[in-house]
Amino acid sequence: MKKLLGALGVSLFATMPVHAGPPHPDVQRAASWLVGIFDNHAQAAADIAGNTAYQHDAAVMVGRAIQDPIEFQDGLYLYVESRRDGEPRPFWQRVYRLRKNGGQIRIEVFRINGEVLGPLGLDPQMLNSLSPGDLTKEEGCDVLLEIRKDEFVGSTALRSCRSDYKGSAYVFSTMRITRDLVVTLDRGYDDKGIQTFGPSDGRGYEFRRSGK
């Protein structure tokens, strides 16, 4: 993994200035709050009981530190996946890079190449086999988080995260992170600003911590 660390520095972030010491405490806190097992079972059950117009699928989100975690300059790396209840394989897998960005925290999002997606979802030890060549940055999809006393709240820039999923032109994503709750909301829009996918009532997926 030290080879991975060095290669990431050369191939992905060669233009960044070098910072001595560990990542900023705010970065460490946000990263630690994203690590663990989370689910939205309470939300999904409430949607069914209340017969809400938009019903969230029951899902599990898992965040794992890479090299517990990988540290590079002022950044931390996490592997994050989501899976629907009862399904063995995740439907969403990414690597997050968290770093201090002025008075905010920036989460950079990386896609993982297809040939390693399946093994990663089934075997956590496969994280140790990731290489820089397995990662592709999702340009324009960084999430900027405001730092508050007991939470981090933020979003992508408007119209910056391009996507053609379900006829979309772009995706607008928001995120709220607390010690035991992660709320994510992804909504797609076409060029005219008409919503193409995601919760129609603006309620994000409420993932509550259920394990480590």
Image (tube, grey):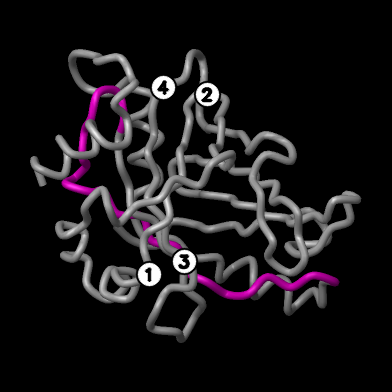
Q: Amino acid at mark 3?
A: Ser
The residue identified by callout 3 is 82
Q: Residue at x 74, y 69 (%)?
A: 166
**23 or 36, nearer to the observer:** 23
The residue type indicated by label 1 comes to: Gly
Left or right of residue 193: residue 162: left
Q: Look at 51% across and 41% down and name the residue there.
A: 177
Tag 3–tag 4 contact (CB < 8 Å)? no
**Disc 1 to disc 3, C-alpha distance:** 16 Å
Tell me the residue that label 4 is attached to.
100
Q: Is residue 198 above or below residue 71?
A: below
Magenta: main secondary structure equals: strand
- For disc 4, the neighbor class at 10 Å (few under 14, some 14 to 19, many from 20) is many
Q: Where is 149 relative to 87, above or below?
A: above
The residue beneath circle 1 is 114
Q: Which residue is mark 2?
A: 147
The amino acid beneath tag 4 is: Lys
The residue shown at (59%, 43%) is 175
Residue 116 sits above or below residue 139 on the image: below
Highlighted range, magenta: 53-75
Of label 4 and label 2, which has the lower sequence position?
A: 4
Of the image marks 1 and 4, the number of the one nearer the N terminus: 4
| Helix, strand or loop at mark 4 | strand
Q: CA distance from mark 2 to mark 1?
A: 34 Å
Residue 181: which numbered mark, if any?
Answer: none
- Label 1 SS: helix
Q: Is residue 166 magenta?
A: no
Q: Residue furthest bottom?
A: 86
